[in-house]
Amino acid sequence: MNLIDNYLSNLGHHYDEELLEPGEKLQIKIPFVFDDRQINLCPFIIPYYSKKSYLDIELKDSIRLGLSDEDINTRMQHLIKNIKYENPGRVGEMGWEADYITDPNLFTPSERGRILISGFKKFRKLILKGEWLEGIHTQPGDIIVSHPLGIKFDMGFTDESKQEGSHHRSILSKKVFKFGEVKEDGMQYAIIGDDLDMHPI
């Protein structure tokens, strides 16, 4: 029995779900140009073709980070609940990166906000038009996961900046993507409904 099967069995989960390799990161580049200043927003999705595959990666990461057994169990129990593991299906881990062609400090806070909102809206349309990316079709029951990490550039690279930036991104994720509140594990979750729209978890 492999690591994740043994772990889930010890927790009392015996769902007959196949362990599949995660897909490649699927990413697009959305350029934003203001006069002679440019920044590229690069949202992405990493597809996990079974929920067990997602839990397998998270368990291995928890072990690699050196978390205690208690912290691992707490983290995994939250994940099992939040991705609705009792219902087999797929998980898409969504996030974004930025390609700074120009120093981001040269953009005003208002411009940075417009870039984020516009980029999020464009990416949401790509997810919900029936395909994630590269022909992966959205299905009812798919779980979308996001970790709202970021900083506020005008506050520098400080813990307070990370806290404020992450809070701001979590609010945008709720408004634009319909993610739920930030959970105990710091992640936000949504489920694809029968209407192929995102609904908060």
Image (spheres, rainbow, N blue to C red):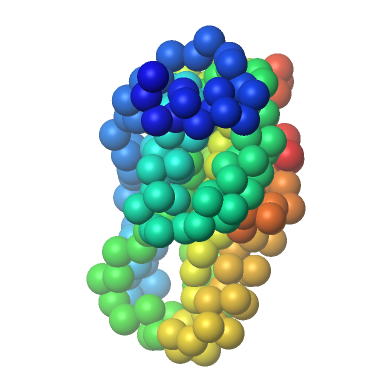
Front residue of 34/199: it is 199
Left or right, 192 with respect to 123, comes to: right
Q: Residue at x 59, y 53 (%)?
A: 70
**Image position of 10 with respect to 181: above or below:** above
Q: In which quadrant will I find the C terminus?
A: top right
Q: Is residue 173 in sight in this rendering?
A: no
Q: Residue at x 33, y 37 (%)?
A: 26
Q: Residue at x 62, y 34 (%)?
A: 80
Q: Quadrant of residue 100?
A: bottom left
Left or right, 32 with respect to 167, comes to: left
Residue 43 x, y percent position in the rendering: 41, 49
Residue 90 x, y percent position in the rendering: 51, 24
Residue 166 x, y percent position in the rendering: 58, 68
Q: Quadrant of residue 40?
A: bottom left
Q: Residue at x 58, y 14 (%)?
A: 15
Q: In which quadrant will I find the N terminus?
A: top left
Front residue of 68/148: it is 68
Q: Residue furthest left?
A: 101
Residue 61 x, y percent position in the rendering: 39, 48
